[in-house]
């Protein structure tokens, strides 16, 4: 079994997966609660399954891009568990797990063709979004980047291809992107269960992270804002 940890957005989610799919799931979308609920969710799921961390085949964590604080918390907990239990650590691109979560549902509900494209988008604060573009087979056709959306976004792709744009960054594209055949989905909800396929692909290929040196993929530097008031009174 693989324990999957997703903390890249405001949603904190933990899933226990086996080769058949998700066995147990816990999540919380109240935001900024990752530090207080993540280890509780992990303990609950392991107790529910009647196993200890040492019985896991691996622990997988969403490695970014996404929330700086959320990623730092998730990766820190995953590294600590991997080291303490002597189990492999797997890092999963956040956009990759988003693709699998969205496409699995969309393929069942829509007439997906081989030319359709999928664009998982994450809120990068201010006016930027983190995004990548995948084809219907899950191969990347445009690597992950941070970009401000405008009327010319996605113009490099032929308009005959539908582009499904989803994630918490998709709302920033409403009324901005002019390209035809862009389908913006604003109700997509993250879940650690979406990590099932890429996590098992990594496990079966022995693609593991170095626990000592693994860091989240922040994509851009963390910026702090300057305080309005001088708290020292000077």
Image (tube, rainbow, N blue to C red):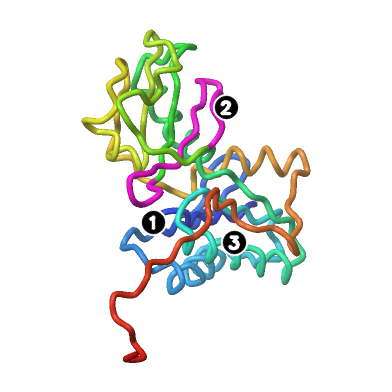
Q: Which residue is mark 3?
A: 75
Q: Answer with left or right where residue 28 lies relative to residue 207.
A: left
Q: Position of residue 69 (x, y in %)?
A: 47, 64
How many numbered callouts? 3
Please identify the dominant SS of the magenta region.
strand
Label 2 crowd (10 A; few <14 / some 14-19 / many >=20)? some
Quadrant where the C terminus sits is bottom left
Toward which corner of the image does residue 232 lie, by quadrant? Answer: bottom left
Judge whether 174 appears above or below 107 on screen. below
- Label 3 and label 1: CA atoms lie apart by 15 Å
Mark 3 lies on a secondary structure that is: helix
What residue is at 48 percent from the left and 72 percent from the top? 40
- The boundaries of the magenta stretch are 123-144
Q: Which residue is mark 2?
A: 140
Judging depth in this view, the residue of 209 and 68 nearest the camera is: 68
Q: Is 135 covered by the magenta stretch? A: yes
Mark 2 or mark 3: name the one nearer the start of the chain: 3
Mark 2 lies on a secondary structure that is: strand
What residue is at 45 percent from the left and 30 percent from the top? 104
Toward which corner of the image does residue 105 lie, by quadrant? Answer: top left
Judging depth in this view, the residue of 117 and 6 nearest the camera is: 117
Q: Which mark is residue 11?
A: 1
Mark 3 or mark 1: name the one nearer the start of the chain: 1
Q: Residue furthest bottom?
A: 233
Q: Residue furthest top?
A: 160
């Amino acid at each position: 079994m693989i324990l999957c940890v997703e903390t890249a957005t405001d949603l904190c989610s933990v899933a226990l997966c086996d080769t058949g799919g998700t066995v147990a799931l816990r999540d919380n979308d109240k935001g900024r609660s990752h530090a207080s609920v993540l280890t509780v969710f992990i303990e609950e799921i392991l107790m529910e399954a009647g196993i200890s961390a040492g019985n896991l085949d691996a622990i997988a964590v969403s490695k970014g891009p996404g929330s700086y604080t959320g990623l730092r918390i998730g990766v820190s907990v995953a590294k600590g568990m991997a080291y303490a239990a002597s189990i492999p650590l797997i890092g999963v691109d956040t956009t990759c797990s988003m693709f699998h979560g969205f496409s699995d549902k969309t393929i069942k509900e829509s007439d997906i063709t081989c030319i359709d494209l999928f664009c998982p988008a994450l809120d990068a604060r201010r006016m930027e979004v983190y995004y990548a573009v995948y084809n219907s087979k899950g191969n990347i056709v445009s690597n992950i980047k941070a970009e401000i959306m405008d009327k010319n976004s996605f113009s490099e792709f032929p308009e005959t291809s539908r582009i499904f744009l989803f994630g918490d960054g998709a709302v920033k594209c409403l009324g901005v992107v002019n390209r035809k055949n862009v389908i913006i989905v604003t109700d997509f909800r993250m879940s650690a269960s979406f990590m099932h396929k890429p996590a098992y692909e990594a496990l079966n290929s022995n693609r593991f992270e170095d626990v000592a040196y693994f860091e989240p993929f922040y994509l851009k530097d963390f910026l702090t804002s300057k305080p309005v008031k001088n708290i020292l009174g000077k």
